[in-house]
Image (spheres, grey):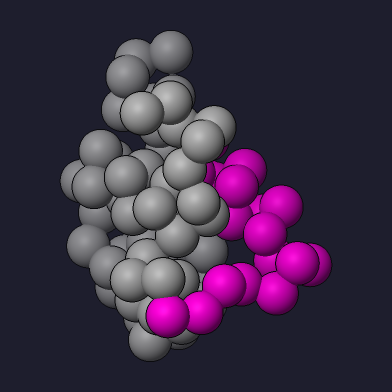
């Protein structure tokens, strides 16, 4: 599955795992609560549209760094 086809929560989880971050560490870096992050990753809720860009930027960077790009 291409990363661009992933839902924001799936993309966030993939990026976090590839980067080797715990949910707590990722939440702290993103500036959100662990509870919110968990909710997005499990697809129970989606982030507010105003936050999606920041989350996507972090996820993209984490994926690039994990892949060595």
Q: How many marks?
A: 0
Q: Residue at x 43, y 13 (%)?
A: 69
Along the horizontal axis of the image, is 53 left or right of 12?
right
7 in the magenta segment? no
Q: For the magenta stretch, what is the residue range?
A: 44-61
Along the horizontal axis of the image, is 54 left or right of 38?
right
The main secondary structure of the magenta stretch is helix
Along the horizontal axis of the image, is 26 left or right of 8?
left
Give the farthest residue toward the top.
69
Q: Residue at x 51, y 36 (%)?
A: 5
Does 20 appear above or below 35?
Answer: above
51 in the magenta segment? yes
Residue 28 visible in image: no
Q: Residue at x 37, y 66 (%)?
A: 41
- Image coordinates of residue 35 in percent, x first then y, are 38, 86
Along the horizontal axis of the image, is 47 left or right of 45?
right
* Residue 55 sits in quarter: bottom right
- Image coordinates of residue 25 in percent, x first then y, are 31, 65
- Image coordinates of residue 61 in percent, x first then y, are 51, 34
Q: Residue at x 47, y 43 (%)?
A: 6
Residue 40 visible in image: yes
Does 24 appear above or below 20?
Answer: below
């Amino acid at each position: 599955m291409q990363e661009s086809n992933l839902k924001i929560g799936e993309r966030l989880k993939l990026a976090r795992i590839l980067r080797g971050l715990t949910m707590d560490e990722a939440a702290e870096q993103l500036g959100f609560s662990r509870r919110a992050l968990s909710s997005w990753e499990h697809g129970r809720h989606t982030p507010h549209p105003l936050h999606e860009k920041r989350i996507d930027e972090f996820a993209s960077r984490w994926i690039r760094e994990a892949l060595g790009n």
